[in-house]
Amino acid sequence: MTDQIQKEVAEEKPAEDQQPKSRDVTPRDESQTQETPSEEQSIPNKPTNPPLAPDNSRGEWVGSGPQAATQITASDKEGQEISGASNPQPQKPTATQTANESQPQNTTPTTTTNQTTQTQETPNTPTPQTATAQSIAQESRQQFKRNVAFKLRIGSINAAQQIMDADRLAHVTSPLLPEKTIIRANVIANITDKYIQEGEKQFGSITLDDATGQIKAKVFGDDIKLFQEFNQGDTVLCIGLLRTWNNELYLTPEILKKKDPQFLLIRKLEAEKMEPKTLDTDTKNNLKNQVVELIKQAEENEGIDIDQIIMKTNQSPEHINQEIKLLLEDGQIYEPRPGRLRYLG
């Protein structure tokens, strides 16, 4: 009995030893799953490391210390590389770049100062090109200055003296305007004849008559259109240049307008006012003798100027110039230089 009891006891002991072991294993596994802290949970329990701060860009916990290194896993690094390739983050400036940006740039003020200095000096020192341009402009104005168109009757134009320059007419001088050089004329007259030539050599002419004489106005080429509106019998105002060809004096019209026939009378009155008043024979003889005496007295000074003769006589300059012209034609006096007279005897 005793042996049997011991056997039963010996058989029951291993069973009891195994049951507690199985009981111990089960709670031990549960405690391992519950109590085994992960690396992330064990980090806050370490008082030596500083607290972590969230990164606003990725929502991760970053900081200094080992927990920051353990926080970013291999998968996170791959994600960062992918996100960095798609959305590149701005690089932080280096210390050298920061120092260069912090230094003030003085290039702009220096350039502005130089420009200001140049603008202040420019008005005080004009360049020679500006002076040359001004002189050229003044010369061109003098060269292209339009001559005066004198109001004349056709008879006065035909009686004028023609001054030639080689084969070209330079100007004419009229007894009505002895001191003027006439290059352009202003005439009012009737059209008595009109001629137009078509074809390759286009030519047109009209004959003007104001009861004192006749003169032709001629155009060439496309200028014949100027005569299309005018016909024989029209009264016109013609302003143009005086030209000559084969000893014929004619006008090259610049302006041609129709006028009322009464303008012929107005032009006649204007011409009469321009004509010098005639002197009686005694007055003319006295004036002639007076001019000759003044020229003789000036022989000691090698002649006298025409302006001095006009100042010392009481007659009009027109009459004095007429008498001087007659004395020159007669050979009693001569003109050594323009405006200077001497006695010849």
Image (cartoon, rainbow, N blue to C red):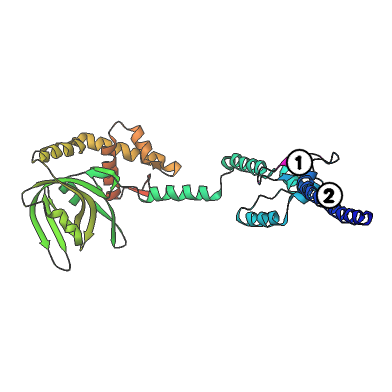
Residue sticking out furthest to the front? 1
| Of 341 and 166, the residue lying toward us | 166
Find numbered disc 1 in the image and state the secondary structure of the residue it sits on. Answer: loop
First of labels 1, 2 by sequence position: 2
The quarter of the image holding the N terminus is: bottom right
Judging by the rendered image, the residue that carries numbered circle 2 is 20
Looking at this rendering, what residue extends furthest in the right direction?
2
| Nearer the observer, 327 or 130 | 130
Corner quadrant of residue 295:
top left
Left or right side of 68 for 182: left
Q: Residue at the far bottom: name it.
A: 200
Location of residue 229 in the rendering, given as x and y in whole percent from the top left corner: 11, 51
Name the outermost residue toward the top. 314
Q: In screen coordinates, is 152 left or right of 315?
A: left
- Of 287 and 36, nearer the camera is 36
Does the image show residue 216?
A: no
Residue 131 in the magenta stretch? The answer is: no
Amino acid marked by disc 1: Leu
Q: Is residue 32 visible?
A: yes
Sort mark 1 into few (<14), some (14-19) or many (20+) by Cα contacts within 10 Å: some
Disc 2 packing (10 Å; few <14; some 14–19; many ≥20) = few
Dot 2 lies on which element? helix
51 magenta-colored: yes
Question: Would you say the magenta stretch is mainly helix, strand or loop?
Answer: loop
Residue 52: numbered disc: 1
Front residue of 92/313: it is 92
| Span colored in magenta | 50-57
